Image (cartoon, rainbow, N blue to C red):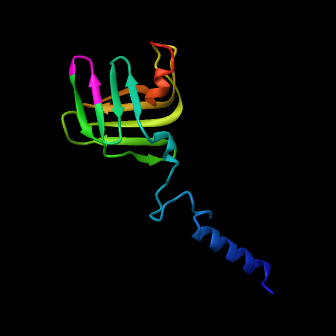
Amino acid sequence: MMSAALRALLLTATLTACGQGSNDATTAKGSPTAASGDFDGDLNALGTEPFWAIKIRADDLTFSRPGVEDAKSPNPGPAVENDRATWTVANGPAPFKLTLTKGNCSDGMSDRHYPLSAVLVFEGKTMYGCAATPAAIAAQPAP
């Protein structure tokens, strides 16, 4: 007959091997993981004063500003940590860093509400905005 301590040790080892133990919040390298579901698929980020928009698609990112030709870059994929995802475009016509964070956001100029807040760093400036899926944005009142 197995002792209670041995049963507990075997159960812990089994759950850990199945990815359900106490280490399931980190990867094998020890870096944090997150449910990236909020950052999967198409997303649109936008900001006001100054106006800017970034369309996140599977293959590319499109950065738009008034009076400037859109800049399209390959999508490097986000670095996801907890409730935040960051896309860094280091090369190309408009290098930038975009960070989306889970949390209610208002663009300050309309009655629209978004599930993600956005921070864009471009040309040494930090700009703020919001983000959501294109469908969620289209379902809300026009600005």
Front position in the image: 103 or 1: 1
Front position in the image: 58 or 14: 58
Task: Locate residue 104: give its quadrant.
Answer: top right
* Image side of residue 75 versus residue 143, left or right: left
- Above/below status of 78 relative to 105: below
Report the span colored magenta: 63-68
Q: In which quarter of the image is the N terminus?
A: bottom right
* Image side of residue 20 versus residue 113, left or right: right
What residue lies at 35% left-to-right and 31% top-to-bottom? 55
- Above/below status of 141 relative to 9: above
Q: Position of residue 68 (x, y in %)?
A: 21, 21
Q: Where is residue 49 in the image (x, y as percent from the top left)?
A: 35, 17
**Is 39 one of the magenta-colored residues?**
no
Q: Position of residue 69 (x, y in %)?
A: 20, 24
Front position in the image: 55 or 34: 55
What residue lies at 31% left-to-right and 46% top-to-bottom? 76
- Above/below status of 86 relative to 132: below
Decide if residue 131 is in sight here.
no
Q: Quadrant of the C terminus?
A: top left
Residue lying farthest to the right in this orientation: 1
- Above/below status of 103 relative to 141: below
Q: Position of residue 16 (x, y in %)?
A: 60, 68
Principal secondary structure, stretch drawn in magenta:
strand
What residue lies at 63% left-to-right and 72% top-to-bottom? 14
